[in-house]
Image (spheres, rainbow, N blue to C red):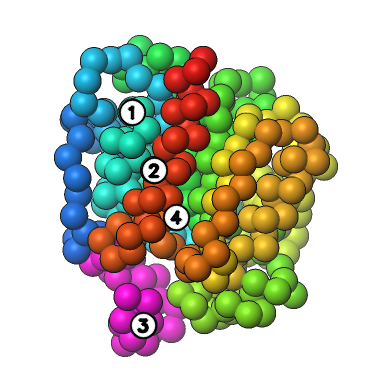
Amino acid sequence: MVRRQRRVQRLLPDQSVRGLRWLTRLGAWLRDAPSVGTVHDRAIAGPDGEISIRIYRPEGETPFPTIVYFHGGGFVSGDLESHDALCRYLTRESECVVVSVDYRLAPEHPFPGAVEDAIAATEWVADHTDSLGGTGQLAVVGDSAGGNLATVTTLAARDRGGPEIDYQALIYPGVGTREDQESVREHADLVLSRADLEWFRDCYYGSEITLQNPYADPTRACDLSGLPPATVITAGFDPLRDGGRAYAEQLQAAGVAVRHVEYEDMIHGFVSMTDQIDRSTEAIADVAEGLRTALLAE
C-alpha cells in the first residue's frame, strides 16, 4: 500500500494542495465504512463562519460519553469523508458518540485557524451534551495534525477554565518534530518525506517563530500539569515518532497519567488505513478500550 501511495504521489505536482486533497478523498472512497447506529451531518457556528461536523451515534440507548475527533492531514488535507471509516470504527468500539470536526485548512487558513475551530467545536459539543445524547463525559481524539489539535484543545480548556475534558487520545500526534531526531533521519520517505514535513510546516505555521507558541506546538508549553489523562499512540517507522514519544514523557513528568503504546512495525497514517492494514482496527480498538475505561468508569 505504501509503495502504491508513493507512486501515485509522484504523478502529482510536488506539494500540490489540490492534488493531495484529491488523493486523500480518493483513499476515503475506497474504504469500507462499517455501520453504526446513526450518522448525522450539520453545521455549527465557528469563529470565522460555519464549521461542518458529523455526529456518529452507536447502537443502543443513550446516553453515551462523547468524543470530539480531529482528523489528520498535515493541517492541509483531510475532511469528514477522509476519516469517516475510522470514526465509524471508533464509534462502534468505544460505545461513544463521536463528533468529527471539519476544521479550516492551510494554506488558505494558517495557524491559528485550525486551533480556533477545534476549540470552538469542543465548546459547542460540551454545551450540547444533552441534545447529542451524551452522559457529560467528554474526550478529545485526533491523529497526526488532529492529535496536535486534540492536545492543544486540552491546553486551551485548562487555561480558559473549561470546558472540562476527561480524556485525550493522541494517535501519532504532530508535535515536537525536529529535523535532527532519529525518527526523522531514519524514516523520512516512508509516507512522509523531509520535503513533505517542511511543506506542511510552511503551509500551516509559516515561520519558526509561530512554532514557539504552545498552541502551535504543545511541547513548547512551560506547564503541562492539570491536563486530562492521555493515551499516546506512536508508530515505529514514523518520522513523527520521536516527537510523540517526547510529548508522552513531558506529560508524565508534569503529573499527567499517560498510557503510551508504540506499534513498532507500523508507518505514519496506519490507523486510518482500515482497508489495507489489519493492525489499524487493532489500534482503534486499543484507543477505544482506553476511552471506555476512562469515561464509562465515571
Question: Which residue carries the number 4 mark?
Answer: 72
| Residue 120 visible somewhere in the drawing | no
Question: Which residue carries the number 3 mark?
Answer: 3
Image coordinates of residue 143 in percent, x first then y, are: 47, 51
Q: Assess disc 4: are there few (<14), some (14-19) or many (≥20) residues with their C-alpha within 10 Å of its C-alpha.
A: many
Image coordinates of residue 99 in percent, x first then y, are: 36, 34
Task: Say which element carries label 4.
Answer: loop
4 or 1: mark nearer the eye = 1
Image coordinates of residue 290 in percent, x first then y, are: 50, 35
How far apart are the alpha carbons under marks 3 and 1? 35 Å
Q: Assess disc 2: are there few (<14), some (14-19) or many (≥20) residues with their C-alpha within 10 Å of its C-alpha.
A: some
The residue lying toward the viewer, choosing from 139 and 25, is 139
**Is residue 33 shown above or below 140?**
below
> Badges 2 and 4: C-beta atoms under 8 Å apart?
no
Q: Assess disc 1: are there few (<14), some (14-19) or many (≥20) residues with their C-alpha within 10 Å of its C-alpha.
A: many
**Residue 95 has which mark?**
1
Name the residue at 25% across, 28% down.
Answer: 58
Amino acid on which the number 4 mark rests in the picture = Gly
Name the residue at 44% across, 28% down.
Answer: 292
Compare marks 3 and 1 and give the one earlier in the sequence: 3
Question: Which residue carries the number 2 mark?
Answer: 285
> Badges 4 and 3: C-beta atoms under 8 Å apart?
no
2 or 4: mark nearer the eye = 2
Name the residue at 67% across, 27% down.
Answer: 158
Q: Determine whether, in the image, residue 217 is placed left or right of residue 34.
A: right
Compare marks 4 and 3 and give the one earlier in the sequence: 3
The residue lying toward the viewer, choosing from 168 and 283, is 283
Compare marks 2 and 3 and give the one earlier in the sequence: 3
Q: Assess disc 3: are there few (<14), some (14-19) or many (≥20) residues with their C-alpha within 10 Å of its C-alpha.
A: few
Give, as a single range, the part of the protein colored magenta: 1-27
Amino acid on which the number 3 mark rests in the picture = Arg
